[in-house]
Amino acid sequence: MKRVVVTIPVQDRHKEYLEKTGAGCEFFYTSASAVTGEKIREADIIIGNINPKLLREAGRLEWMQLNSAGSDTYCAPGVLKPGVVLTNATGAYGLAISEYMVGMSFMLQNKFYRYCRNQINHLWKDEGDVTSIWGAVTLTVGLGDIGGEYAKRMKALGSYVIGVRRTKGEKPEYVDEIHTTESLDMLLPRADFVALSLPNSRGTYHIMDERRLRLMKPGAYLLNVGRGSAIDGDALCRVLEEGHLGGCAVDVTEPEPLPADHPLWDAPRMVITPHISGQYHLPETFERIVRIAGENLEKFLAGDIDGMRNLVDFETGYRRKQDKTVC
């Protein structure tokens, strides 16, 4: 009998679904903050994120299903014992985060953030010219679930969309061009919107450094919803202060939480949200996570490991290449 520890905040109907799918398993429901080392030691399966330090005690663990799309923390050497299957929740967040990104795109190009500030100050003021998504060039760096969903929406709004992915692959119908990361320097000067939805890795750390920020088209907009480490924050402050960019919106920062005295808070044309674009604010996101967990539970118990969704490659932190939707 497999023992399953569930740390995501499931309701009774979710429990019923998981227990029906995992008939014959013993389920224990808790939270990431309350789970004990004893329960981790007993677990054959964990559904949900927990403190990686606790996993050192997970001697029986065979499979871990994350409730996050990012998995880099769990791929670090020594966190999981060799042979443990790791799957993430890619596919659950694309809806919520892509709509957040479109909303921020509208906010930046229509200067809505300025009008919000003016309202607080009771100031009736015209903030001047705006730009349009229609006819603009959108560069989506990271073309997994989140980046792909944003690309679809921007194309539907009339933008010319360029996708950048880590490895070569067929061009999806929702982008006009597809390139690999090696072409980023060539593509940045073309883009009106640059959107980052990247995991944390050696290859993505400060991928937008000062040199690349200055390669962006004057007046272009930058969005980041992946990891704060993708952008050099100090360089971003300088570039914004100089007026090179039309604006920037980030839901992730380096570090998190962003210290109250960090200059990025007061940088001109800057919009910051506290890593809220995903999470469970949109209820459908959580429903998708539960469905992914249930589908993978069924596959795991049947011994169909290769058929599981979102198998993580520990070397790269990305989904394995046999997954057709790999970014």
Image: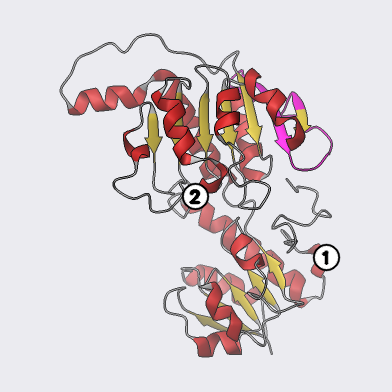
| Residue 24 showing in the rendered view | yes
Task: Judge by depth and name the residue closer to the eye, 271 or 202.
Answer: 202
Residue 28's x, y, as percent?
53, 83
Q: Nearer the viewer, residue 96 or 36?
A: 36
Left or right? Give the position of 22 relative to 8.
right
Instruction: Determine the residue positioned at 52% across, 30% down.
Output: 222
Question: For the N terminus, which image quadrant?
Answer: bottom right
Residue flagged by tag 1: what amino acid is it?
Answer: Asp
**Residue at coordinates 54% horizontally, 77% vertically from top-left?**
53
Q: Secondary structure at mark 2?
A: loop
Query: In the drawing, does residue 47 fall left or right of residue 238?
Result: right
Q: Is residue 150 left or right of residue 306?
A: left
Is 43 a magenta residue? no
Dividing the picture into quadrants, the one containing residue 57 is: bottom right
The numbered mark at residue 278 is 2
Residue type, label 2: Gly
Between 50 and 166, the one nearer to me in the picture: 166
Q: Which mark is residue 135?
A: none
Instruction: Please state the extent of the stretch shown in magenta in the rendering.
Output: 155-177
Task: Please name the residue shown 51% across and 25% down the image.
Answer: 221
Disc 2 crowd rating (10 Å Cα; few below 14, some 14-19, many 20+) is many
Location of mark 1 (residue): 306
Residue 285 rendering spot, x and y as whole percentages: 53, 52
